[in-house]
């Protein structure tokens, strides 16, 4: 069978490497892919958001299965379009993808169905939002309603910062139309946990928990990014908390989406905060997290393609989804200056190392075959080991083998998790 994987980042590279383990798959086409993905799949220069182009290609190539990995095409309805022409697909419908596509929708869903989350208010008028800010206790969180490349969430320490955030999002439109509505919500405290879960709309099969590192600089300082690194499993996510999340959050979310006529099939990402009052949802994503996928999928023992087919066929209940009893760490090597201005086109060299796993996020091949950086987050280096300490050490050893002008990485990925494990 020939399949397509839509997208061109580290998440897609991770998915493709895992899918290659299944012998029934012949050719994997990546649309559009990247320089690293080209080593593992046939890259086709069709943008993930070019729905007409993707559908046409899938028809011409008689594609047997499609994986729609990024949020944008899911929210735009690519999975619906593919299913409409008879191509089975891993990824939710546009109606279900609204759980990520609209913060307002997801917050209102949680309020309606009693799913624990931060208290909040929604505003479509900047003057009303500014008036409300005067009544707030700080810090607070301000979120653009729509998709914003993972950067549409601003934590405001004081009233002035909150005013500036409203001006930037709602008036200057730094996130475009995604900022037409905003959610202003209470600031929650506690350890953060990411839990990705397979679901076919009937059952939920959670994956190994993980911990993301969003800030650009050591010590969780600097600007928010798409993710500077991850570890799995998350030591704060105990068996007791997992059981509580299944009962209070995971199953109620699936049931709520079914009740709304928006059955969710695919990978549902739960961004959680373990507050003093119990676990609460910070956000949902309608797809694999990036770089969470880079640590979670290498630990998956069950064949990924078999899981994806079970999700589409709604037979997930019949499948045991198992993970290795190991730890994984991903260190993102990024372009200097990210997430603000950075230079592209710098040649990359990678020293070969035994056991290294490299997932390319922002690379491309030049006409003469040179691998160069082509984005802010360039390559994720993943290390695994029986211990978290060993996995972190391996990830950094592999990351240091990546060289290009201006390369940067945080030096403390996993440190917080190590301290938690010692408590």
Image (spheres, rainbow, N blue to C red):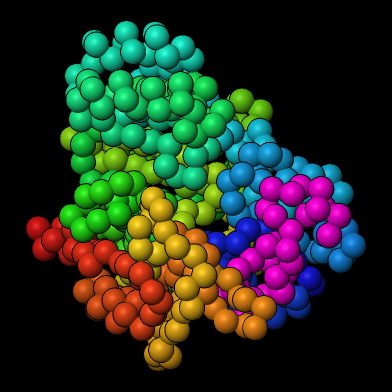
Query: Magenta segment: does it hold 34?
Result: yes
Q: How many marks?
A: 0
- In the image, which residues are magenta? 29-57
Give the residue at x 75% y 75%: 27
Rendered image quadrant of residue 378: bottom left
390 above or below 203? below
Point out residue 80 in the picture as x, y percentages from the top left corner. 75, 42
Point out residue 161 in the picture as x, y percentages from the top left corner. 26, 27
Give the residue at x 40% y 64%: 335
Report whether 248 appears left or right of 364: left
Query: Magenta segment: does it hold 164?
Result: no
Can residue 303 be seen in this snapshot?
no
Can residue 413 be seen in this snapshot?
yes
Rendered image quadrant of residue 207: bottom left
What is the quadrant of the N terminus in the image?
bottom right
* Direction left: furthest residue: 423
Give the residue at x 55% y 62%: 9
Q: Depth check: 120 or 340 in front? A: 340
Rendered image quadrant of residue 58: bottom right
Give the residue at x 74% y 49%: 50
Q: Depth check: 67 or 248 in front? A: 67
Q: Depth check: 172 or 40 in front? A: 172
């Amino acid at each position: 069978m020939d399949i397509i994987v839509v997208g061109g980042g580290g998440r897609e590279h991770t998915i493709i490497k895992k899918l290659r383990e299944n012998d029934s798959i012949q050719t994997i086409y990546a649309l559009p892919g990247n320089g690293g993905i080209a080593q593992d799949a046939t890259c086709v220069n069709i943008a993930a958001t070019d729905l007409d182009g993707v559908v046409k290609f899938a028809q011409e190539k008689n594609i047997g299965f499609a994986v729609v990995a990024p949020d944008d095409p899911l929210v735009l309805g690519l999975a619906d379009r593919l299913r409409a022409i008879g191509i089975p697909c891993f990824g939710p419908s546009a109606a279900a993808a609204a759980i990520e596509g609209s913060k307002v929708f997801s917050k209102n869903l949680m309020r309606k169905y009693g799913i624990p989350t931060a208290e909040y208010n929604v505003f479509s008028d900047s003057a009303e939002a500014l008036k409300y800010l005067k009544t707030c206790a700080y810090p607070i969180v301000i979120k653009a309603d729509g998709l914003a490349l993972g950067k549409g969430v601003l934590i405001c320490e004081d009233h002035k910062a909150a005013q500036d955030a409203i001006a930037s999002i709602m008036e200057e439109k730094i996130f475009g139309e995604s900022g037409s509505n905003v959610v202003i919500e209470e600031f929650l405290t506690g350890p953060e946990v990411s839990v990705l879960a397979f679901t076919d709309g009937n059952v939920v099969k959670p994956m190994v928990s993980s911990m993301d590192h969003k800030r650009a600089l050591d010590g969780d300082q600097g600007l928010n990014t798409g993710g500077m690194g991850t570890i799995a499993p998350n030591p704060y996510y105990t068996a007791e908390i997992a059981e509580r999340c299944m009962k209070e959050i995971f199953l109620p979310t699936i049931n709520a989406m079914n009740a709304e006529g928006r059955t969710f099939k695919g990978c549902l990402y739960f961004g959680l905060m373990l507050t003093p009052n119990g676990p609460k949802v910070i956000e949902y994503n309608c797809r694999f997290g990036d770089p969470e996928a880079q640590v979670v999928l290498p630990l998956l023992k069950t064949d990924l393609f078999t899981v994806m087919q079970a999700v589409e066929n709604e037979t997930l209940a019949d499948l045991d989804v198992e993970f290795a009893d190991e730890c994984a760490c991903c260190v993102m090597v990024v372009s200097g200056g990210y997430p603000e201005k950075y230079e592209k086109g710098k040649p990359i060299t990678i020293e070969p190392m035994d056991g290294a796993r490299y997932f390319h996020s922002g690379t491309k091949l030049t006409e003469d075959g040179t691998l160069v950086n082509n984005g802010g987050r360039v390559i994720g280096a993943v290390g695994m080991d029986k211990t978290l300490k060993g996995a972190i050490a391996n990830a950094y050893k592999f990351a240091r083998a990546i060289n290009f002008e201006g390369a940067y990485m945080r030096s403390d990925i996993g440190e917080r998790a190590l301290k938690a494990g010692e408590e």
